[in-house]
């Protein structure tokens, strides 16, 4: 596998996926205002975004509806209240976590839904369960993805087995998700190359979902793109759990396809994003996330550190090192 | 030229250069407290930093001493007030801009100075003048660098001519400085490869100084490193003009050589860096810097935008586009 594309032309196979409501919802418990969601939908259409992810299809048995905003559950009528019948070129997606979605009952047939794509998030050991969900969604008529989470913790042999199973499924797009923000670009290159080998023999598409713990979310997205990934996740101002994601602003500024337009996103940022920060919601690169990223662990301890408004970074570093010793 | 090094071992030729006082001084007019500078010096020694840059050797004819902190001028006695005779493994550097330094009189002989290295910053058309300064510093007994600024605006033919002239000089280290934060990693790779070809035939060392306009300062530093650059500029918390620089924290967390220790830098950040931000000094990634970076222009308009506390990003984007049309 080698480089695809260059810095002047563009690849028509690239699809930009806006995950602001979904990954950003992990920051504010999905409590976005109606105005925010309406404006984001219109912004994405104007900006040429290919897919907008509204949130999760979480199980109402496992999660209390009162504790979260509506985009944790993505009821059909809530999406339609924003998009109507979605008379636009942009497709809509929702995410379903393995083990956390009543997919058989909660995901209706495509002909009865305005949703276009179901994205299934799974750890590597959950691939068989993910495939069951994918087949269900595929048979109901949806585009499907499988997003292998915490890719930085997946060994080469495990990845090969997982990709071999996925190759046999009906899934359309296979993501590498660097959930811990632990990967350097050269690791992303190696992993993307493994994915692309599978893609070359199956015709499946490859996607990347990056986190910004080491300020590498955009660089890692570029790296995967350069090696052939076409589905690129981003969020406005990088809003997402912990260190957040690849910034939509940096990604759209990079892409050369005239279908993409940065200006509407600028308008959205100046009107809506600072307001979210002013409410006290915290995301984006900071030292605690750098440390969990470098140590290749879940950002939960860093999120706790930030929530407690601690700033004793040196002590936190020692705590993480102590945790490593106990493993 | 191919990849050098890997993610487990380390390259002993790598040198980390702390530019916090010098590039960070462009944020606060070099008004660092004595406590800040003393602590940074001790921190860098403990962290294993190879060079600490104190500031500029600016001409006192061109710049009023009252308008800047002392690190704009880096008088010998001011440096010695911090480092004594610098009885440490860490070397000290200062920067001299072409045309802004009275180098013949202000840079004394090495035997009378605690400074180890003179770094000469030059735009590509100033290379002949830079070489005059380098020869002077070299003959006085210093290590020398030439830092080609705004590398994103240098054409291939110009770069070849510049590097050919530099190859004939006595300079020790040749930097690519992405002053506008305009380069993507694949451009850094191509440019570094040109530098490395010159290095291969002359024995000179190569360095990188990156800016974070597109959140790529660290990624671009890694890219240059991977292609053979050994001198790596960074600043604590990325403090530097506009979008700032490669973060020392991310760089030290990456490097595998046991000589480097992240912990002292964590201590320094928690004690000193938030305090600088609390004083109202602004640096680091933000949309205006992204836009000047993408458009490959000097960040001055973005700095003005931030100083004026404007947040109308969409309007600023249009203003920059208008400027492009007038060119």
Image (spheres, coloured by chain):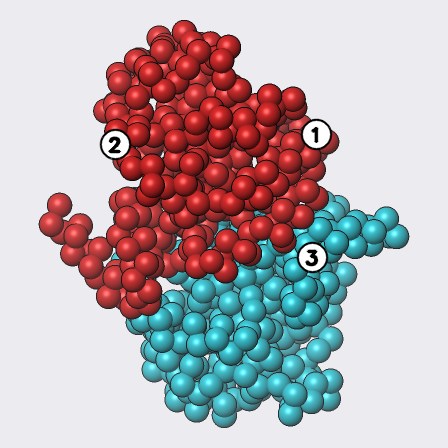
Chain colours: A cyan, B red
Disc 2 designates what residue?
Answer: B62
| Disc 1 chain ID | B
Instruction: For residue A162, say whether it is visible.
Output: no
Q: Position of residue B132 (x, y in %)?
A: 30, 13
- First-in-chain label (2 vs 1): 2
Q: Secondary structure at mark 1?
A: loop
| Disc 2 chain ID | B
Residue at 50 percent across and 40 percent down: it is: B20
| Disc 3 chain ID | A
Residue at 49 percent across and 36 percent down: it is: B19
Residue A274 image-quadrant placement: bottom left
Label at residue B259: 1
CA separation in Å, label 1 and label 3:
23 Å
Q: Residues within 10 Å of mark 2 (few under 14, many from 20)?
A: few
Q: Residues within 10 Å of mark 3 (few under 14, many from 20)?
A: some
Label at residue A312: 3
Query: Is residue A285 placed above or below B68 in the rendered structure?
Result: below
Residue at 60 percent across and 73 percent down: it is: A26
CA separation in Å, label 2 and label 1:
40 Å
Residue B61 image-quadrant placement: top left
Q: Secondary structure at mark 3?
A: loop
Residue B23 image-quadrant placement: top left
Q: Position of residue A39 (x, y in %)?
A: 37, 80
Q: Residue furthest left?
A: B326
Residue placed most toward the observer, A38 or A207: A38
Discs 1, 3 touching: Cβ within 8 Å? no
């Amino acid at each position: 596998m080698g480089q695809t594309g260059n810095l002047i032309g563009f690849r028509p196979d690239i699809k930009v996926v806006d995950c602001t409501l979904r990954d950003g919802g992990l920051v504010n418990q999905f409590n976005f205002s109606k105005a925010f969601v309406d404006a984001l939908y219109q912004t994405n259409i104007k900006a040429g975004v290919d897919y907008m992810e509204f949130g999760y299809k979480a199980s109402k048995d496992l999660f209390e509806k009162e504790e979260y905003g509506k985009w944790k559950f993505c009821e059909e009528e809530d999406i339609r209240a924003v998009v109507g019948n979605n008379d636009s070129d942009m497709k809509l997606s929702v995410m379903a976590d393995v083990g956390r979605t009543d997919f058989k009952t909660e995901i209706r047939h495509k002909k009865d839904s305005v949703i276009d794509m179901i994205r299934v998030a799974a750890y590597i050991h959950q691939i068989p369960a993910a495939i069951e969900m994918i087949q269900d969604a595929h048979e109901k008529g949806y585009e499907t993805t499988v997003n292998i989470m915490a890719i930085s913790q997946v060994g080469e042999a495990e990845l090969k087995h997982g990709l071999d199973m996925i190759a046999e499924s009906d899934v359309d797009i296979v993501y590498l998700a660097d959930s811990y923000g632990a990967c350097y670009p050269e690791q992303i290159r190696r992993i993307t190359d493994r994915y692309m080998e599978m893609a070359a023999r199956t015709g499946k598409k490859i996607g990347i979902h990056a986190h910004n713990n080491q300020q590498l979310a955009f660089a890692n997205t570029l790296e995967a793109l350069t090696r052939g990934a076409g589905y690129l996740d981003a969020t406005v101002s990088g809003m997402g759990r912990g260190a957040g994601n690849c910034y939509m602003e940096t990604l759209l500024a990079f892409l050369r396809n005239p279908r993409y337009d940065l200006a509407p996103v600028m308008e959205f940022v100046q009107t809506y994003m600072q307001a979210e920060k002013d409410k006290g919601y915290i995301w984006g690169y900071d030292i605690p996330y750098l440390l969990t990223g470098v140590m290749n662990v879940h950002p939960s301890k860093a999120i706790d550190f930030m929530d407690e408004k601690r700033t004793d970074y040196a002590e936190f570093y020692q705590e993480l090192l102590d945790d490593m010793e106990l493993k």
